[in-house]
Amino acid sequence: MPRPPRHDESALLDAAVRLAAAGGPAAVTMSAVARESGAPNGSVYHRFPQRAALLAELWLRTVEEFQGACLPAIDAHEEPHLAAGALARQVVAWCRAHRERAVVLLHGPEAFGRAEWSEEQRLRDRQGGLRVREALAGLAGRLGAATPLDLDRVTLAVTGLPLAVVRGPLHAGAPLPPHAEELAEQSAIALLRAAA
């Protein structure tokens, strides 16, 4: 039975996450990932033929983990306002549990060179965005939202507000306040109920 690779793609991407969280996307170079992971340069280039591929996989893995962990919260409650609150809470909880990955997401895909990604990587990015839009449109429908303003309000409630709660502490390197999840949940519910 062959030995598993010592420096697999996941370990290299974990190293890239640490670098991006500490120094921004510019800190994620092939040689820096090799140093951070303890892998030879050749191992990095074997898995990522150029820096654009590395940056794309760093972003895509992170955002797909985030979406996979957060979107199911929409189904946590039959009552749609509570479902929206659960999603807002989960966004903050994920950021608390995965602080470095959350910092990566705050930079946005353009900072990770989206214009240079392969067509396959851009397709993955579009598919992820479509999953999010469909999930939020479904939630908006459950809330009786019918206009573009309504949909924007739902998006603000379940993503914009939670990210506003975490952005300052994450950028400052400070801990999230213990009430951050509750604040995001209550704010989302209050905003959506006020508009109902």
Image: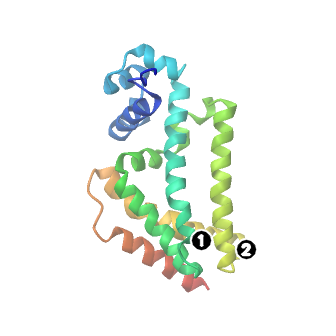
Query: Which residue, as the protein is rendered here, is positioned at the far top?
Result: 42
Helix, strand or loop at label 1? It is helix
Label 2: how many residues lie within 10 Å, few (<14), some (14-19) or many (20+)?
Answer: few
Where 114 sits versus 47, above or below? Answer: below
Read off the residue under disc 2: 147
Direction from residue 167 to residue 69 in the image, left or right: right
Judge by depth and name the residue closer to the eye, 153 or 78. 78
Q: Which residue is mark 1?
A: 154
Relative to 92, is 189 on the left or the right?
right
Label 1 crowding class (10 Å Cα cut-off): few <14, some 14-19, many 20+?
many
Q: Is residue 120 left or right of residue 89?
A: right
Along the line of sight, the residue nearer the viewer: 135 or 196: 135
* Tag 2: amino acid: Thr
Total numbered labels placed on residues in the image: 2
Amino acid carrying label 1: it is Val
Quarter of the rendering containing residue 153? bottom right
Q: Secondary structure at mark 2?
A: loop
Q: Which residue is drawn at the image coordinates 49% and 74% (left, top)?
A: 85
Query: Which of the two residues, 187 or 35, is positioned nearer the viewer here?
Result: 35
Residue placed at 73% from the left, 76% from the top? 146
